């Protein structure tokens, strides 16, 4: 991918690679619309007990003949059992330890989708990689199901570091992270608290707290936010009195004439053979909203320095401003890469658009 400009932005060797700005303002969406990051029909699932059998390819992308995949499990600090796929280059020297990369999936996604694709691609490039299901979803444990918990989702990354650090193939001093969409914000929180994460890249990142509080492009007024919190309070009373949890829907099951551009973008991935997966059809509980409202992933971002950060966003992505905000707040070394012509979801699976060479160069240099 060509670079049109490299501008020094700080004394910490930070660079910003940029392309022409978008010609039109991004469409504003309400707070509930942000859960398009979480594909959902509004149904609760109990899929944590059915771990796919070894040897059965259940991903949304083709299997590589250059990479072996092993199903692994490990517990997080909260006692939740997490399930992951470990991607190992077939030609790896098993007598020595290697750098490893953890890949987090989009908010509400599962490891069989974009995070698995990233893990396999990076394994083809020589890294040991791990894609895992976050707590309360996919094949991972956690009950009740479908809870959105910033604490748990952040802890999941450190627990993945714990696991990799015990693997005989991995050099525990050379572990990095890629966070896609919502997991980008949780991975930033993890890196701020866990110096064992030596390098971090985010792709199409969402600031999940800001999106939940203020909606896309910060268009949700305070009164609407307060109304949502009152709705949550009523729902808590309802559940205390025996009612079932209410779910916040995400990607619509079908499109209408009134469907927004963002809804159509997510539908094209999560509701078509391109990215649809049976364990990625759940919603999040309405009562998860206050925890997400109070989540500020960039508060400690400067403390990640001097460990390096790489932010990747699409030129046309509705989420681009989240990466630009994080880049501005980070202390460096840091880099912001804007991918020409790419939208938010394009960077989930469009291999020809995803800058894997940039990611490979970044982690090869930073993890050694």
Image (spheres, rainbow, N blue to C red):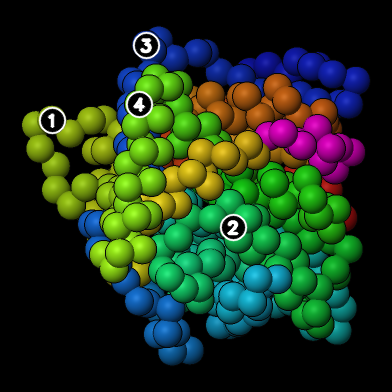
Select label 3 or label 2 by which is in front: 2
Q: Residues within 10 Å of mark 3 (few under 14, many from 20)?
A: few
Badge 3 is on which residue? Answer: 24
The x and y percentages for residue 59 are 40, 70
Q: Quadrant of the N terminus?
A: top right
The x and y percentages for residue 154 are 65, 55
166 displayed left or right of 182:
right
Disc 2/disc 4 C-alpha distance (Å): 26 Å
Disc 3/disc 2 C-alpha distance (Å): 34 Å
Disc 1/disc 2 C-alpha distance (Å): 33 Å
Considering the whole magenta stretch, tell me its main secondary structure: loop
| Foreground pick, 157 / 241 | 241
Are the residues at dot 2 and dot 4 in contact (C-beta closer than 8 Å)?
no
Badge 2 is on which residue? Answer: 153
Disc 3/disc 4 C-alpha distance (Å): 26 Å
Are the residues at dot 3 and dot 4 in contact (C-beta closer than 8 Å)?
no
Secondary structure beneath disc 3?
A: loop
* Residue at 47% in and 32% down: 213
Badge 1 is on which residue? Answer: 258
Indicate the quadrant where residue 295 lies. top right
- Mark 1 / mark 2, whichever is N-terminal: 2
Q: Residues within 10 Å of mark 2 (few under 14, many from 20)?
A: many
Q: Residues within 10 Å of mark 4 (few under 14, many from 20)?
A: some
The x and y percentages for residue 184 are 59, 45
Select label 4 or label 1 by which is in front: 4
Disc 4/disc 1 C-alpha distance (Å): 21 Å
Q: Taking the image as drawn, is residue 358 in sight?
A: no
Are the residues at dot 3 and dot 2 in contact (C-beta closer than 8 Å)?
no
- Look at the image and give the residue range highlighted in magenta: 298-307
Q: Residue furthest left?
A: 257
Q: Does the magenta stretch include residue 213?
A: no
Q: Taking the image as drawn, is residue 284 in sight?
A: yes
């Amino acid at each position: 991918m060509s670079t049109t400009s490299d501008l020094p932005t700080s004394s910490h060797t930070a660079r910003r690679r940029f392309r022409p700005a978008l010609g039109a303002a991004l469409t504003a969406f309400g707070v509930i619309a942000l859960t398009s990051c979480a594909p959902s029909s509004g149904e609760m699932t109990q899929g944590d007990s059915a771990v796919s059998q070894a040897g059965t390819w259940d991903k949304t992308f083709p299997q590589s003949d250059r990479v072996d995949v092993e199903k692994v499990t490990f517990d997080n600090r909260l006692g939740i059992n997490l399930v992951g796929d470990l991607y190992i280059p077939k030609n790896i020297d098993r007598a020595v330890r290697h750098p490893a990369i953890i890949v987090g999936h989009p908010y509400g996604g599962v490891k069989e989708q974009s995070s698995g694709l990233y893990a396999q691609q990076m394994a083809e490039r020589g890294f040991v990689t791990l894609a895992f299901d976050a707590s309360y979803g996919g094949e991972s444990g956690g009950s009740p199901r479908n809870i959105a918990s910033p604490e748990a989702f952040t802890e999941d990354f450190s627990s993945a570091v714990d696991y990799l650090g015990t693997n005989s193939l991995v050099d525990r001093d050379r572990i990095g992270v890629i966070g896609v969409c919502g997991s980008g914000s949780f991975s930033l929180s993890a890196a701020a608290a866990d110096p064992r994460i030596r390098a971090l890249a985010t792709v199409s990142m969402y600031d999940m707290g800001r999106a939940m509080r203020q909606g896309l492009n910060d268009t949700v007024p305070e009164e609407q936010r307060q109304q949502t919190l009152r709705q949550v309070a009523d729902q808590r009373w309802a559940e205390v009195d025996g009612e079932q949890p209410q779910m916040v829907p995400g990607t619509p099951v079908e499109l209408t004439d009134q469907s927004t551009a963002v809804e159509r973008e997510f539908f094209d991935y999560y509701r078509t053979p391109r990215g649809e997966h049976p364990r990625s059809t759940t919603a999040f509980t309405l009562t998860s909203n206050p925890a997400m409202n109070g989540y500020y992933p960039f508060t400690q971002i400067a403390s990640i320095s001097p460990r390096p950060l790489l932010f990747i966003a699409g030129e046309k992505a509705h989420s681009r401003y989240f990466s630009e905000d994080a880049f501005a707040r980070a202390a460096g070394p840091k880099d912001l890469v804007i991918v020409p012509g790419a939208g938010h979801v394009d960077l989930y699976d469009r291999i020809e658009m995803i800058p894997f060479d940039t990611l490979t160069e970044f982690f090869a240099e930073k993890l050694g």
